[in-house]
Image: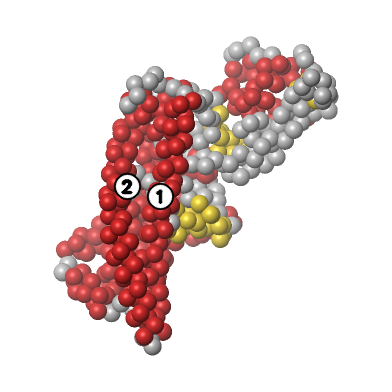
Amino acid sequence: MSTTANPGVDGAEPPSALTLPALADGTEFVGEFKNSGYREQPQLVCLPNRQLVRLPPLLFLVAKSLHDHRHLAGTDVESALDLVAADVSEKAGARLTGEQVVYLVDRKLAPLGVTTYSDGTSPPLVKADPFLALRFKLAVFPESVTWFIGGVFGWLFRPLVLIFTVAAIVLSEVWLLGTRSLVDALQHVIYNPESILLIMALGIASCAFHEVGHATACRYGGVRPGVMGCGIYLVWPAFYTDITESYRLGRGGRLRADLAGVYFNGIFIVALTLVYLRTGYEPLLVAVLYVNIEIIQQLLPTLRFDGYYIMSDLVGVPDLFKYIGPILRRTVLRRPADERLQDLKRWPQLFVTLWVLTVIPVLVFQIGLITIQVPSLVSKDWGMMRRLWDAAMTGADPLHLITSGMQILLLALPLVGLALIFFQTARQLVRLAVRYVQGPAPAPLTDA
């Protein structure tokens, strides 16, 4: 076996010494990706930054064997690599040499951040940049707090409690749709805009309780939820809970974690309905309507809301957006399917294709509609903001001043969001055009 790695050019640098590659510090084996949509059952590895890497069986066996033979570090490297190769060959049912282990490490595992290079160099910090992902994340509660919170509300997932609670949610929704009090409640809010502050506060509380549901579902399933925090999605502030560990569960456990947020929103609606029946305070009905809008938004499958992750876990494919390019190239440009599509089983491939061909026209229609309405929207929002500002400056009521300020902020955010959406869309189109010119790219192994 050759005893060099990363040789120098024209003798300018001496060849680096060969070492026994090791698992990157903080990397953890998650195990089999259960109920996946891939032809080969992949294995998952969690990097130190909690990003998941999907590995084919052979690469996973190489990484696992290197970790199992880490005690051989410092001994004869070639002999240690031969032992690793023999171990992998026995488990994989295919002949592998020490040189091939080095090749797989330097060309596949180390660039993904899973292991060190064969010359002892540390792997790069791998950070995924998913399309339409949450940005500027700030952790607020550590794992210990989310674990505690999950234990407090875990009883809500017990079968009998779950059935009773879902029945209460359905009754509350039926009552809301059937009552005429909602019209009166909306009129009350229009004539008393100060109550908007209460509705917004309850909406924020509902969003936070939504994230508690995700954390609780993880703990109920037997895995540890990650941090809870906030970030920016497109332009709107948003809460999040790290439920990466849910990938240790089967399809049922992952779906429970996906649906738990909406389930807790329903519980919030029941609580608001009971308080209204007790007090008769009409803005609470508008708050219930607001939470229902949150639920509808979360169930949309077009953006990275809960509905998107529900579909992703149903089909067993972690990132649906990365298949937009391959599917459009195959269906629109009539190119052969690349490796990413061929890796999928037949029905998940059909499912993802239908999702892409449905989502793309919807997104194009939405963007086109927004584009047409942009001049009118900017004009109306600017006029409304000026009127609110003038009213706030002339009004002496501090509560009215705060309300006007919040309304101005809510009117300004969509305008900033439109600019960001157009920028991200244009950037993605440029990337797709570049990839089209360059040809199909090799299949990535990361699904974070």
Q: Determine whether the residue tagged by mark 1 lies in a helix, strand or loop.
A: helix
Above or below for 209 versus 96: below
What amino acid is at disc 1?
A: Ile
Quadrant of the snapshot with the N terminus: top right
Above or below for 295 versus 331: below
Q: Which residue is mark 2?
A: 367
How far apart marks 1 and 2 lie (CA) works out to 9 Å
Q: Which residue is mark 1?
A: 421
Q: Looking at the image, do the residues carrying marks 1 and 2 touch, with CB atoms under 8 Å apart?
A: yes
Q: Can the viewer see residue 299?
A: yes
What amino acid is at disc 2?
A: Ile
18 and 380: which is toward the camera: 380
- Tell me residue 196's x, y (percent): 33, 73
Disc with the residue nearer the chain's start (1 vs 2)? 2
Q: Can the viewer see residue 366?
A: no
- Tell me residue 109's x, y (percent): 63, 28
Q: Determine whether the residue tagged by mark 2 lies in a helix, strand or loop.
A: helix
Furthest residue toward top: 95
Left or right: where 373 falls relative to 427 = left
- Tell me residue 136's x, y (percent): 53, 54
Q: For residue 386, which quarter of the picture?
A: bottom left
Crowd tier of the residue under label 2, counting other residues whose Cα lies within 10 Å: few below 14, some 14–19, many 20 or above:
some
67 and 49: which is toward the camera: 49
342 and 375: which is toward the camera: 375
**Image point 34% across, 35% down: which residue?**
356
**Image point 64% across, 40% down: which residue?**
125
- Tell me residue 107's x, y (percent): 64, 24
**Image point 32% across, 47% down: which residue?**
367
Q: For residue 131, which quarter of the picture?
A: top left
Left or right: where 46 falls relative to 380 = right
Above or below for 314 versus 326: below
**Image point 52% across, 39% down: which residue?**
448
